[in-house]
Amino acid sequence: MLEKGFYQFIRKIKLERDGINPKEYPYCLKAVRELNELELHPNVTYIIGENGSGKSTLLEAIAVAFGFNPEGGSKNFNFSTEETHSVLSESLRLTKGVKKPSDGYFLRAESFYNVASNIEQLDREGGFGPPIIESYGGISLHEQSHGESFMSLLTYRFGGKGLYILDEPEAALSPTRQLALLRKLHELVMDDSQFIIATHSPIIMSYPNSTIYSLDDDYKKIEYQETEHYRVMKDFINNPVGMLRYIMKD
């Protein structure tokens, strides 16, 4: 598969440790504690690990350091429903590529509802251009299911030559739609886009031209078949009766 790297928008992420207290939040989180310098894949970089390891906090900090809104959206979004984001972005140094993205989006599943609400508010207030919702397919995101609204985002809003940071996108998607996400991801990669994704989904993390960093192994690069997500799912699918009998035994 062709590797697209000329339009890599973030090449490295480095944590500047001067003046930080490793015992304080968010620097005490495993995702931050073990971070020194991380080289990103020109196509797709996956960050995986257990719940509570700090994946979402790290992705949020990368997004904010690049100029995105902490709650999600494009760089044009500047709303805030609650000031809860960490100061980690102030300690991150991004090594950027020579090209600037033409498009970009930070998706976090937990606050996508707030993005949808902000879109409706801005469209009610009006402006000089067309309604924002037209960039999402023209149908209110609140009038769609979580999965449908996310697919509208993928289908209509992601335009290519962009930087897309996705925090656990599988939260809204059935397995079939996770496969549809992979197809769209590939189309966007072929259109000079770069992705940074935190996920638990063995389907979503299967994209072949990528790098997977495991927080459980101190940011070790691992192969797809080595991930716990792949191995556990494979064992279960191959022997569901035996797995269920094992986990349910007294």
Image: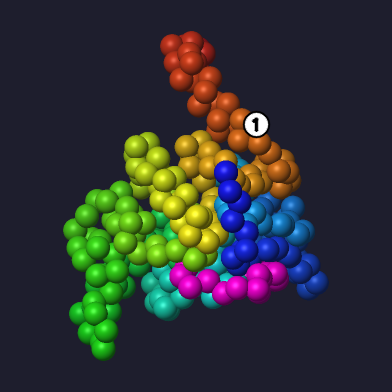
Q: Position of residue 213 (x, y in %)?
A: 66, 46
Q: Position of residue 67 (x, y in %)?
A: 54, 75
Task: Give the class, few, some or many, for how many residues have Cα within 10 Å of label 1's Cα (few <14, many ≥20).
Answer: few
Is 224 on the left-hand or right-hand side of 23?
left
Verify whether residue 144 appears in magenta: no
Q: Position of residue 219 (x, y in %)?
A: 71, 47
Is 122 on the left-hand or right-hand side of 72?
left
Quadrant where the N terminus lies? top right
Q: Is residue 83 in view?
A: no
Q: Is residue 226 in view?
A: yes
The image shows residue 61, relative to residue 186, as above or below, that is below
- Image quadrant in which you'd find residue 125: bottom left
Q: Which residue is identified by label 1?
A: 226
The image shows residue 72, relative to residue 182, as above or below, that is below
Q: 198 or 5, which lies in front?
A: 5
Verify whether residue 98 appears in magenta: yes
Please give the count of numbered marks on the rendered protein: 1
Helix, strand, or loop for circle 1? helix
Residue appearing at x 53%, y 42% in the figure = 207
Residues in magenta, as a range: 88-104
- Image quadrant in which you'd find residue 140: bottom left
Is 146 on the left-hand or right-hand side of 59?
left
Q: Residue furthest bottom?
A: 128
Residue appearing at x 53%, y 38% in the figure = 206
Q: 155 or 169, which lies in front?
A: 155
Q: Residue furthest right?
A: 18
Q: Position of residue 114 (x, y in %)?
A: 34, 66
